Image (cartoon, rainbow, N blue to C red):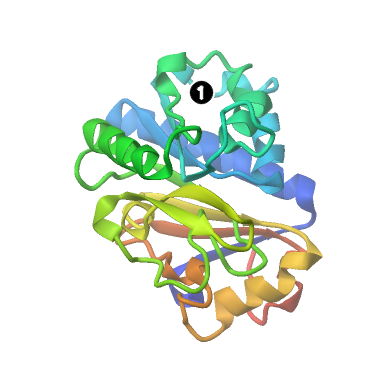
Amino acid sequence: MASRSELHVYRDSRALARAVAELFVATGRMAAAERGAYHVALSGGSTPRAAYELLGQEPWRDELSWSDVFIYFGDERCVPPDDEQSNYRMAERSFLDSVGIPRANVHRIRGEIEPGHAANEYASLLRADLGSTPHFDLMLLGLGPDGHTASLFPGTPPDTGDDGLVRAVYAQSQMMWRITLTPKVINAARTVAFAVEGAEKAQILAAVYEGPVDPVKYPAQIVAPTSGRLMWLVDEVAAGMLKTRAR
């Protein structure tokens, strides 16, 4: 994967969060200047939360015209929006409540309804907003310790049902349903950025980034933007087992 992507290593989790926030703002400014709107798909997890919290504070929250920003989600757990496991709830509390974004610009996945209906509903929303092949300006992703990303889990070819844009998946390891964008949508983004931190991610990062390609085992390896930019933003300890290093 290294030949098709950019690796950026930061000294610690704080520097990584700042880099993600900077990418969010820079991508947004460019999108707004070139196309008049910024469409971004958020990821859940503790790594992006720190970046979101920066975006919700001064001076970051004044760096974008939030009326031009349109928020979507790369995946969601099938829980109500006020549940502690909800990616929407995390993003809302981290920065969406404090940046003055119009509520109509925030498009959550309705995890509280039947999973199949939620997936179909979100796919219809994407088609209505962004066309039959949505092109997000920025797709933020995380990397799970098992090699999953978004809600694409090991054991099944991750591009199954790609044309549906969004699908419901049952995460056996968590014993719960989740909704996820498909690789077709992820790989159509103009910029795809993984944010990875912590020593517990070092082994899986090395396997996904430098190891043999087996997307059934490591679904994150399916991520290869068609014509966009692929970035890996990682901290020093997560990069500790990589043979290839760059800054």
Residue at (45, 32) in percent of width and height: 110
Look at mark 1 in the image and give the residue it sits on. Answer: 64
- Element at label 1: loop
Relative side of 159 to 87, left or right: left
Q: Is residue 163 in view from this perspective?
A: yes
Q: Nearer the viewer, residue 35 or 46?
A: 46
Quarter-wise, where is residue 183 in the image? Answer: bottom left
Percent across and percent down for residue 18 are: 69, 41
Q: Which of 22 and 238 is in front in this view?
A: 238
30 shown above or below 217: above
206 shown above or below 79: below
- Which residue appears farthest toward the bottom when viewing the image? 212
Quarter-wise, where is residue 128 in the image? Answer: top left
| Mark 1: amino acid | Leu
- Which residue appears farthest toward the left when viewing the image? 132
Percent across and percent down for residue 172 are: 57, 62
| Quarter of the image that includes the C terminus | bottom right
Relative side of 34 to 78, left or right: left
Residue at (65, 33) in percent of width and height: 90
Percent across and percent down for residue 46 are: 71, 45
